[in-house]
Image: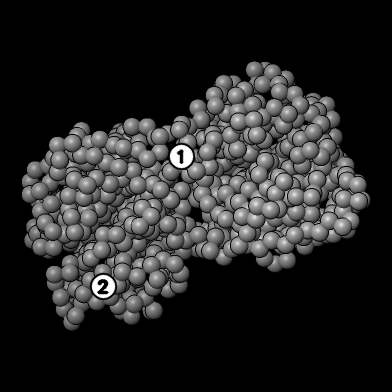
Amino acid sequence: MRETTLKLLKYFFPVALLIGCTVEGFSQQDFIWKNVPVGGGGYVTGIVIHPSDPNVMYIRTDVGGLFKWDPTKKMWLPKTDMFSADQRPYYSVDGVALDPNDKNVVYMCAGNSYLSGIFKSKDGGSTWTKVKKLSFLGNGKLRYFGEPIQVDPNDSQTIYSGSRNDGLVKSKDGGTTWARIESVPSGATDIGIRSVAIDKCTIIDGRSRKVYVAVYNRGIYMSNDGGKVFSLMPGSPLQPSRIVVANNGTLYITSSTGVTKFNGSWHDISPDTHHYNAIDVADDDPEKIIVVADRGTPDINPHKLSIYCSTNGGKSWISVLPKSKVRYAAPWYTKERFSSATASVKFDPLNSNKVYLTDWYQVMRTNNITLSTVSWEQLIVGLEEMVVYAMVAPPYSKGKAPLVSFVRDNKGFRHYSLEEYPTSQINFSSGNGLDFCESDPNFMFGVSYKNKKGNAAYSTDNGVTWTKVTCAFGRLGKVAYSATNTNLVVVVPEDNAPVRSLNKGLTWQTTKGAPSGAITNVFKWSVPIASDRVEGSSFYMLYPNGDFYRSNDGGAYWKKTANIGVAGNYIVRAVPGMAGVVWVAATKRGLFCSSSFGDKFERVSGVTSAELIAFGKNVLGRAYPAVYLYGTVKGVTGVFQSVDFGANWVRINNDKLQMGAAPSTMEADREKYGRLFIGTRGRGVFYVECSTGSNQE
């Protein structure tokens, strides 16, 4: 590796620069990691609160993992960031349960179709032990139903857990061993058992006697003997969403038929004809109930779902939504984003006037649900779980934004500040390709996967405003902007050859020499195209079979120059300020570099896997940029920095932050040494800064 790197350095820089210049050593402690604040933006599918301490709260998400509330800092702290990329399914949390008798014990159901199970933590989520392999789909159908797991309030050693396809299991020894309860069926495929409830007022042999299980497409099953045998409750709702038992033993159920209660007989107490999901009963008043309509109701608008509260066990209801006033912490949120596809509601166990609500984007709290005006506040500090499709980090010393991002479901953002929430969204949706003109970062171009009409847009003011254009060659994958020509862009559509525009997308031209197939699926994470960051007429492109192409005339004609074996996703990146220098992160095939405009590549030894690559501000004494890698070096997977162009690598993340939410895109800061941005597939955007200020220019 050192030999390959020194060849490149000798080619570009005076030998005197390399002699007598010592590379300073850095450690993981020199780098400080944070999230770029955006604020929520992803599905919060459940919330649980400890019955004796309302400051002990956890929320689960479908792609961002588990978070715990810090009452001192008044923010959510991630509790699953220690899971690695190989364990990415565990960031999809399908259920949570707290031990009512021990605030430090929490159980988590997480995973997907090929990797899932039950986890136990004895230290409030700081560490986890997998205690049972079981089927869960934290990002699957009806993931907003729940909770499928419960700890017996009368015996902490007894735990019940439903599953997606493996029925109901029970542990009698705190999760060490488990046994399936055969009297409970599995339910609908990939939905299964989504809710379990325990009546703590009934006791047998030191355990709770009555246990209820909601089996989708079968109904409610009840045990009256401490969980030994269950039987179907005749007349119970066939498609239950959530179930909860009040302190007087009354069972409440939400389902596709509305809201039902059972106190010896069945009673329909639905506020209207909607399907219902979110429900809770106050600990201090068994007649006080709150419910929210289900997003699955036919022809319903999933935004601003109806919220109803009852103080007489469902005999009458008060509509909460019309008298609700919402205060957003992040200014980019719009009014319709309240109670959107609401997943769960919870009363504060010690103060039933206080209510929490989770939905598609956030956690909300009101301090008094009973007032004539119900004020809700957004609790999103620390909650970052967006899926990031594309980013750019252009030079910004002249007042430009250091970062612009495209994200799933929330358009995108111009991050002028890395400490404050964005003030607005980018006016361009479903973007998955983004680039800027190297010589003038005011000019940016984005492409969308949304439909086959070929949605695209350009900006001439550093991403503040966007003008929409059309590239009618199918769904668009990625884009490369000329380094010197603000009118020239090259786009790679899905299942098509590259096309180019000489007027920022107003009209398009087909190209010659390059085949179709660089992008066959716009939802894959490969970035097969790049522009040289110095020579404005040079562009590069890589194909799944390893064929590397170059254009010397602004993308009009392409020629094959080399072949690089690739495996899985791959990224083509040209080095800023260095004409003809292009690197390829080829996943399990490793890392390749060329100093000849792609005519010849050399493999960087020691790098056994390269997922993402980026180039940023140089370290003091070096004229070439710092290199950043997400991959595997000498058997260790992580985020690495090299200040000597790949001769040596230092891991800059740690085992507590494993980047397991699957980094999707990576950009390095051009102005500040040591600052790196990593977009993920569920934990938003991370950024890291070097705390060793003396090593900056």
SS for callout 1:
loop
Counting other residues with Cα less than 10 Å from the Cα at mark 2, is it few (<14), some (14-19), or many (20 or more)? some
169 relative position to 670: left or right: left
In this orientation, which residue lies closer to the viewer: 671 or 34?
671
Q: Which residue is mark 1?
A: 421
Q: Which residue is mark 2?
A: 101
Q: Position of residue 255 (x, y in %)?
A: 24, 49
Kindly indicate the quadrant of the structure image that contains residue 170: bottom left
Inspect the image, locate mark 1, and give the three-letter code of the amino acid beneath it.
Tyr
Q: Quadrant of the N terminus?
A: bottom right
Q: Position of residue 452 (x, y in %)?
A: 57, 29
Position of 111 relative to 491 (above/below): below
SS for callout 2:
loop
Residue drawn at x 34%, y 77% as measured from the top left: 174
Q: Earlier along the polypeptide chain: callout 1 or callout 2?
A: 2
Q: Is any atom of residue 100 visible in this view?
A: yes
